Structure formats: C-alpha cells, structure tokens
Image: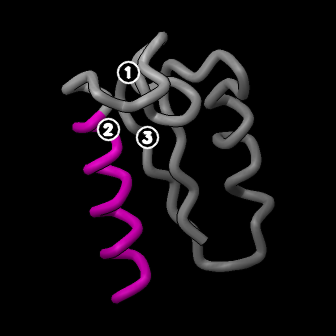
Amino acid sequence: MLVVHGTADTLVPIDTSIAAMPLLNTESQLLKIEGAQHGFAVDDDPTYLDPQSRVWQEQTIRAVGEWVTT
C-alpha cells in the first residue's frame, strides 16, 4: 500500500498516516510530499494552476506509477 500525504495537510495531519503505517498488514510505504496540503494543491488553487500545485501532483502521479509497476 502506498500512502501519499502532504506534510502541511491541516485537514488530516500527517501524524495520522505516520501512526497508521506500523498497523498496516501489508507491504507499505509512506511518501511525504513536502509542503503539500490536503489534495496536493496550494491554498485557493482549486483548478491546480499554481506551479507548486502542479509539482506536487506530478510527484504524486510519478510515485503512484512507480508503485504499481514494481
């Protein structure tokens, strides 16, 4: 299981995922997206046009692609 979590998420704090990782009964990895919030977008960027939002989403998409193909 790949868990992707933004380190600046205020809706679901990253500590929630950190605490859950040892409880998973399967191969798992926590990918921390530095500075990302919930949804991997900059505040007030609902259309994901901010360059930083796009960087975070590219990181997430790349990581998921690598996870499912390995």
Q: Which residue is mark 3?
A: 32
Could you tell me the amino acid type at mark 3? Lys
Q: Which residue is mark 2?
A: 56
Say which label, 1 or 2, has the lower sequence index: 1
Name, please, the residue furthest toward the front: 47
The quarter of the displayed image where residue 17 is located: top right
Give, as a single range, the part of the protein colored magenta. Answer: 54-70
Residue at image location 58% in from the left, 23% down from the top:
9
Query: Which structural element holds mark 3?
Result: strand
Q: How far apart are the two marked residues, 1 and 2, measured between alpha carbons?
A: 9 Å
Query: Which structural element holds mark 2?
Result: helix
From the viewer's side, name the closer residue of 48 and 69.
48
Query: Which structural element holds mark 1?
Result: loop
The quarter of the displayed image where residue 51 is located: top left
Q: Quadrant of the C terminus?
A: bottom left
Mark 1 or 3: in front is 1
